[in-house]
Amino acid sequence: MDTFSIIIPVYNEEAVITKNTESLIRFLNPKKLAYEIFLCNNGSKDNTLRLAKKIERKYKNIKVISIPGKGVGTVFKKAVKLAKYNNIISQDMDLSTDLNFIPEALELLKEYDIIVGSKKMGSQKRSFLRTMPSTIFIFLVKLFLNLPYKDYSMAAKAYKKEAIIKHIDKVDYGTSYVIDLIYFAKRDKKRIIEIPVKCIDKRKSKFNILHESLYRLKNLIKLAIK
């Protein structure tokens, strides 16, 4: 039986956290998999944490992690350390990427260390304001770090814990933790594969595009000069 931990960052998700967590459970349970789900609250200012704890009381394989301020990379690191399974899947709370990535990634993790789910390789229904900065960033990643992958978002990524735990404390506090992990794994000659995923944006981005772009560029330069 395949075993895995799902890590889901949550920030101000009161509108969808219960519905989408239960949708994920309904998708997984018929497949008879052994899994745990981490709902990783980072600085929510609404009822997200209260609702997450209510879900945790209802389902034995749901675990809630919370930190007081924003820091998706920080809470991801905490979840990785607590994960009891070697296979780790990263997913968004809005479930914008096709959930079939999960069983496909689990099969590939038998051979590879990191699975990069790529919206660029697959199909995506997203606004130009979200795809344009991403395209520029991917170009800069190839230019600065010579990494060939086309998607460094948080969702639809899979990791072997044993392959990333060595560098987990080096990754950044924010969304750049994904590129950090891929960069260190590539440097360590870990086996990485990129596969297409489907993505349909169901809401506006919660990130300030200018702030997020400058933050990622700064972290990219830090990696390049190491």
Image (cartoon, grey):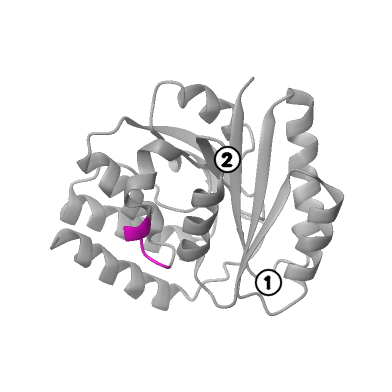
User: Which residue is identified by label 2?
Assistant: 84
Q: Residue at 44% of width from left, 63% of height from top?
A: 175
Above or below: residue 151 compared with residue 12: above
Answer with the quarter of the image where residue 93 lies.
bottom right
The image shows residue 25 at horizontal and vertical percentages of 77, 40
Report the residue marked by disc 1. Answer: 12
Which residue is rendered at x = 73% and y = 69% of the image?
A: 49
Numbered range of the magenta stretch:
169-173
Q: Is residue 85 above or below residue 139?
A: above
Q: Is residue 223 left or right of residue 75?
A: left
Q: Quadrant of residue 29?
A: top right
The amino acid marked with disc number 1 is: Asn
Tell me the SS state at disc 1: loop
Q: Amino acid at mark 2?
A: Lys
**Structural crowding at the residue carrying mark 2, measured as other residues with C-alpha within 10 Å and reported as few (<14), some (14–19) or many (≥20):** some
Q: How many marks?
A: 2
- Residue 195 horizontal side relative to residue 55, left or right: left
Is 210 on the left or on the right of 170, as rendered?
right
Residue situated in front as seen by the camera: 74 or 150: 74
Check the image and name the residue furthest to the left: 225
Residue 77: assigned label: none
Which residue appears at 38% of the width and 63% of the height?
133
Give percent across and percent down for residue 91: 58, 48
